[in-house]
C-alpha cells in the first residue's frame, strides 16, 4: 500500500472538484463512491470501507470528506488507521467561502434568513461551538488546522494551497498538488466545476432531505449509510436550476466586520504556510 493523502475540508473550497479530477489518475486510488462518505471518522477498524483503503495497489490513496478538519477526533481516527497520512487543504477567501456556504445552505433548505442577518447573529450572539450551518467559524482556518491537525502531526505533512491559485478564472491548475503527492501529471478537464451555482427546482425536497426530521431518523434505522449518502447526493445534484443564485451583496459595514473577524487568523495562515493570503483575500470584490 502506498501513502494515503486526505482532503479533510473546508466546505465550499473546491474539494469535490479536486477529488473528482485526482480520481482520474491511474496512480491514485480515489473511489468516487467514497467522496464525502465520512467512514474514516467513526473509528471502526473492521469496516469494509477501511479495508479497501488498506489494500489498494496504486501509488497513493486519496480520501476526501468535508469538515474532517473541524474535528480533533476525526483526525485522530484517521491517524489511527493510517499513521503516516498526509493532508491537503484548499483555503479560500473566508468571506467568499461564507457567501458560498450561505447559498449552499439555502439550496439545501436549511437557511432562509437574509445573509446579513445570519452574519450579525453569528458575530454578536453565535455560540463559539461549531454547528453544521454556521458560516463564519469554519473560515478561521488556522485555528482549526492548529488545534486539530498540527497538534497531532508535524507541519511537513500538511500542505495548504490557495483556492485562488488552483481555481483560476479560465482553468483549474493542480500541478502543485500533484507534485506534493508525488504522482505524474496527467490529462484532465481543467474547466470542470462541481457543486456549482444554482438554486433548487423543488425546495421542499431538499428541505426534507437535509433538515433533521422523523422521516430521516426512520430511514437511518433501515437504510445503510452509503446508500443514504449517495441518494441524497444524487437528488441534490439533479434538483437544481444551474447558474441562478439569490444575490448576496455586502455593504461596507458588513465587509469591515467580516474582514476584522477573519484577518488575524488569515495572517497566521500567511506566516505559517508562506501563502499570500492578505494579498489575495479581502479585496472587496464580492
Image (cartoon, rainbow, N blue to C red):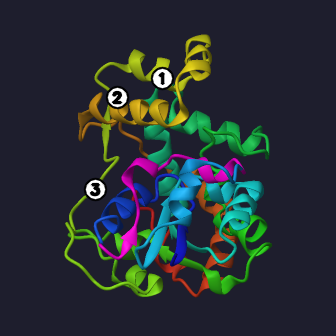
Where residue 235 is drawn, which disc sits there?
2
Residue 31 highlighted magenta (yes or no): yes
Disc 1 + disc 2, Cβ < 8 Å: yes
> Residue at 62% across / 48% down in the picture?
47
**3 or 2: mark nearer the eye:** 2
Query: Where in the figure is residue 75, as x and y percent of width and height?
Result: 70, 61
Marks 3 and 1 sit apart, C-alpha to C-alpha, by: 23 Å
Q: Is residue 32 above or below residue 276?
A: above
Q: Mark 1 points at which residue?
A: 209
Q: Is residue 124 above or below residue 207?
A: below
Where residue 193 is drawn, which disc sits there?
3
- Mark 3 or 1, nearer chain start: 3
- Badge 2 crowding class, 10 Å Cα cut-off, few under 14, some 14 to 19, many 20 or more, is few
Marks 3 and 2 sit apart, C-alpha to C-alpha, by: 18 Å
Write down the region rendered in magenta.
26-43
Q: Quadrant of residue 268 in the image? A: bottom right
Q: In this view, does 242 lie above or below 207?
A: below
Depth check, front residue: 2 or 71: 2
- Mark 3 or 2, nearer chain start: 3
Amino acid at each position: 500500500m502506498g501513502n494515503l493523502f486526505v482532503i479533510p475540508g473546508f466546505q465550499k473550497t473546491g474539494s469535490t472538484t479536486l477529488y473528482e479530477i485526482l480520481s482520474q489518475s491511474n496512480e491514485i486510488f480515489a473511489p468516487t463512491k467514497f467522496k464525502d462518505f465520512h467512514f474514516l471518522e467513526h473509528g471502526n477498524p473492521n469496516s469494509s470501507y477501511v479495508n479497501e483503503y488498506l489494500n489498494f495497489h496504486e501509488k497513493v490513496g486519496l480520501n476526501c470528506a468535508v469538515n474532517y478538519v473541524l474535528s480533533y477526533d476525526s483526525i485522530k481516527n484517521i491517524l489511527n488507521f493510517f499513521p503516516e497520512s498526509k493532508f491537503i487543504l484548499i483555503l479560500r477567501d473566508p468571506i467568499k467561502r461564507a457567501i458560498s456556504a450561505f447559498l449552499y445552505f439555502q439550496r439545501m433548505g436549511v437557511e432562509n434568513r437574509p445573509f446579513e442577518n445570519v452574519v450579525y447573529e453569528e458575530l454578536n450572539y453565535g455560540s463559539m461551538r461549531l454547528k453544521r450551518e454556521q458560516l463564519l467559524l469554519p473560515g478561521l482556518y488556522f485555528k482549526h488546522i492548529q488545534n486539530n491537525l498540527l497538534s497531532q502531526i508535524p507541519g511537513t505533512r500538511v500542505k495548504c494551497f490557495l483556492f485562488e491559485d488552483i481555481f483560476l478564472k479560465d482553468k483549474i491548475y493542480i500541478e502543485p498538488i500533484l507534485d506534493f503527492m508525488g504522482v505524474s501529471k496527467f490529462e484532465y478537464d481543467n474547466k470542470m466545476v462541481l457543486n456549482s451555482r444554482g438554486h433548487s427546482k423543488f425546495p421542499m425536497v431538499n428541505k426534507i432531505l437535509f433538515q433533521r426530521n422523523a422521516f430521516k431518523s426512520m430511514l437511518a434505522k433501515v437504510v445503510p449509510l452509503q446508500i443514504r449518502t449517495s441518494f441524497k447526493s444524487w437528488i441534490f445534484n439533479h434538483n437544481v436550476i444551474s447558474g441562478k443564485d439569490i444575490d448576496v451583496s455586502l455593504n461596507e459595514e458588513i465587509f469591515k466586520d467580516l474582514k476584522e473577524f477573519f484577518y488575524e487568523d488569515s495572517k497566521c495562515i500567511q506566516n505559517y504556510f508562506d501563502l499570500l493570503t492578505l494579498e489575495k483575500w479581502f479585496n472587496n470584490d464580492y
